[in-house]
Amino acid sequence: MISPLRIAGAVLVVVAAMVATTGAQSGEYVTVQKVMNDQAIVIRANGATYRIEKGVGCLSLSRYEGKRVFVTSPGLFLGVGSKIVIPDLGQECRIWTSEQIESPRSTPPQRAAPVQPAKTSLSLADLEGSIILATDGRPLGLITTNCFKAEALCNEFGQYGNSFNANSILNEFGQYGNEFSAKSPFNEFTSTPPKIFKDDKAISYLSRNAALTPRVDPLWLLGALKIKREDRPNIALQLTSGVVVVARVRARQLLEMLLAAERGR
């Protein structure tokens, strides 16, 4: 059996060999957040996040989501000539382009509105009637179980519940629904997610970032609203179709007439 020390030593040798072949370079470990074909999102130890486009060679990079890989850079971090190295597999690939998409050092600190102290756990009843506001002040919907309200988040035909609307948190490609956007509640690392306001006071963050308190998880909220909507009678979802409603009412009347006739025998 090969000892763990020998395996660790072999990994260090591979890294040293790969770095040596490219001359004097600096290197560091980064965490792979997500891999999308030839693109990937990586995070440095200081929290700075980058979107990179890589070349061929790192065929197994998608298996390293949530894990660390090694980056070598001849000059600036992720600059010209930089490479990704997967030491334990002996794979490496060139980084063609890189873009910093969120950096606590390059982004000037923003003065966040104070969040009113709230209960550590908010129920759907507590949130009824509250509104969601993005950090840029844009409204993102009304939290209510009345899904027929035009501004309701659970109204899939409304502005805020329509997943094709550019300003909906349900649009995974929009700035408020993309998990990599600093304004999105689905970004697990952002410090600027939307807030929930009730009676003109901020009561919670709407965020997947567990470091923020108090917060409401957007996946929980959407799930709770969806369950609430589906619990209603099907006829309530068909109010826009008079034909369906009338047909169901007539069917019920016919059934009552048949039952009455049966009892009269």
Image (tube, helix red, strand yellow):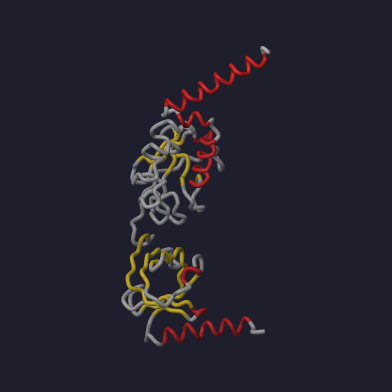
Q: In front here: 20 or 106?
A: 20
Q: Residue furthest top?
A: 264
Quadrant showing the N terminus: bottom right
Query: Residue, x 66% and y 17% (percent of image)?
Result: 262
User: Residue 75: where, in percent of width, then height?
Assistant: 33, 78
Q: Position of residue 133 (x, y in %)?
A: 39, 41
Name the residue at the front extreme: 265
> In this view of the protein, which residue sits in the foreground, 77 or 146?
146
Tell me if residue 214 comes above or below residue 100 in the rendering.
Answer: above
Give the quarter of the image for residue 53: bottom left
Q: How many marks?
A: 0
| Residue found at x 44% / y 40% | 196
Q: Tell me if residue 262 comes above or below residue 123 in the rendering.
A: above
Residue 132, image x, y percentages: 41, 40
**Side of 254 where 40 appears, left or right:** left
Q: Residue at 51% x, 86% y: name it.
A: 13
User: Residue 226: x percent and y percent?
Assistant: 51, 40
Answer left or right for 236 relative to 48. Answer: right
Residue shown at 53%/45% (left/top)? 220
Q: Nearer the viewer, residue 115 or 15?
A: 15
The quarter of the picture where the C terminus appears is top right
